[in-house]
Amino acid sequence: MGEFGYPRPQLVREQWTSLNGPWRFLFDDQRRYHWPGGGFAWTHQITVPFAPESAASGVCDAGFHRHCWYERDFDWRRGEGSTILHFGAVDYKARVWINQQLVAEHEGGHTPFCADITAALRPEGRQTVTVQVEDDPHDLAKPRGKQDWRLEPHAIWYPRTTGIWQTVWLEQVARTYIKSLRWTPIFENYEIGCEVLACGEALDDLFVEARIWHRGQLLADDNYKLLENEASRKIALSDPGIDDSRNELLWSPERPILLNAEVTLRHRGKVLDRVSSYTALRSVSISRDRFMLNGRAYPLRMVLDQGYWPRTLLTPPCDDALKRDVELARAMGFNGVRKHQKIEDPRYLYWADRLGLLVWEEMPSAYRFSARAISRMVREWTEAIQRDYSHPCVIVWVPFNESWGVPNLTSTQAHRNAVEALYHLTRTLDATRPVIGNDGWEASATDILGIHDSDCDPERLRARYASNAQPGTLVDLRRPGGRILTLDGFPHRGQPIMLTHCGGIAFGGTGTEEECVASQARFVDLYRRLLDVVGGSAMLSGFCYTQFADTFQETNGLLYADRRPKVPLEQIRAATLHQCGEP
């Protein structure tokens, strides 16, 4: 396996130490151990950050295991500042000790956490980190996405992911340091919002310096005083006043212009912390029945991407694999991906930002409704939004998919309340992006009406989504999956209509999809005719084809699971762009 890049690409420090690699590991099905001083009988060596269910981990055990332990030693000299230990993601509950001192606890399998471990470190020499994980494989009331609750993957669910599955790393910082950094593009005013939160020892006279430049040209160099360790300011960029000149700085898939940034924390002139970052000037919005990018109607050509790999499951094999996935989506003619049931590794978002690919971010679902399930989802969804808010590639938030976790939306008020509450919470946490409350059907509070329609017959789709069809008729009569499109009391109000799940042609495998074809020629022909319909309908503001790559028993990908194209990429690209008149 290859290298992993810096795990937090919008708040980068030059000095960091990866703790990926071999760790001691054991399953603790009998709950024999309760803290690190218990004298472990280690049974395996595992390669972090690969989950024990994966082949790449070296454990390759996909059985039911609720509890497990990790441990490794590392050499570290305690400096004058603070040492921060970071975990990209641990599924599901984690407790962390340094030298047998508890330093962190976290619940939620898809979001990062960290701990200041300075007080637990020995002055120098060997240190030991121990991690206890609890991940009930049968718990349907926690956000689990596509992880199967049966022993063998069935239907549309896949192998489980237990424990550490993203990078673990260390950083040495000052006693007072930059904890978080948030960028908000303000397209209309040609400004960039900058929010900085400092953490650690409380100091007076803290200042933050924010510098932004593009291609060597300094665009802004501002100083702000922190009040109660926070600063929130709008950085004005020099406005050329002419559209052509303004467009030189606008981010889009066609021209992914990033603005480099450096943020420095100072105390009475002394530099305490300095981080590298980036941002972009772009806007996403809804205007009547169209999705808008940078103030212009922008048709979305997306592909559903589940982010699994055969040997590594939810963890990418390496940073290059994430970059390659972005490049492949673009090479096939798509301008966006719908990341399905996964909070993707931040490195993927980095490459999407840099190479130019739009991303819909979707919360992994729970499958049983309860107050506890919703509380878990709210906490983790809030963390996901905080983590990914500043990425320009992220354009839509989707808290629920196909009524998973809220199965009785038509009859149970509490289920409807959950969708509406998550919609409004998301809009509160981020007022700059559209939100789909429940994607697929049974829509209530939503900025986009997303429809999931797996029909692979181009003529039936043409009749359904013809340019001269009336949206009201579609909403009233269409029953995808046997479900109504909108709930009573939530009629279509003119929002954009998008086919956010379509296609699903199986070729080159033994899948059970509705439409299987036996030849490459038939595959390309049917794909082209389907996209002619969904890409050429004036009723639709965009589509999402299913799917990017084969995923275990689902063989309806445009690529094989190892990312080999099933047909030449240029043929897929030509078919994807056929209705768009693009090269």
Image (cartoon, rainbow, N blue to C red):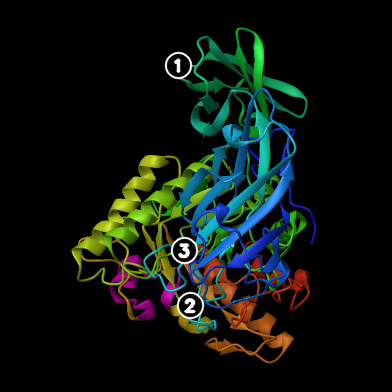
* Amino acid type, label 2: Arg
Circle number at residue 175: none
Where residue 357 appears, x then y in whole percent?
64, 53
- The answer to whether residue 575 is above or below residue 106 is below
* Amino acid type, label 3: Leu
The residue depicted at 33 percent of the width and 54 percent of the height is 375
Q: Earlier in the sequence, mark 2 or mark 1?
A: 1
Q: Quadrant of residue 470?
A: bottom left
Q: Main secondary structure of the magenta part?
A: helix
Please name the residue that numbered disc 2 is placed on.
462
Where residue 363 appears, x then y in whole percent?
46, 58
Q: Write the start and end of the magenta stretch as one range.
A: 464-481
Q: Residues within 10 Å of mark 1 (few under 14, many from 20)?
A: some
Q: Quadrant of residue 324?
A: bottom right
Q: Is residue 273 left or right of residue 563?
A: left
- The answer to whether residue 17 is above or below residue 106 is above
Q: Viewer-proximal residue, 348 or 514?
A: 348
Q: Is residue 244 left or right of residue 298?
A: right
Q: Viewer-proximal residue, 249 or 2?
A: 2
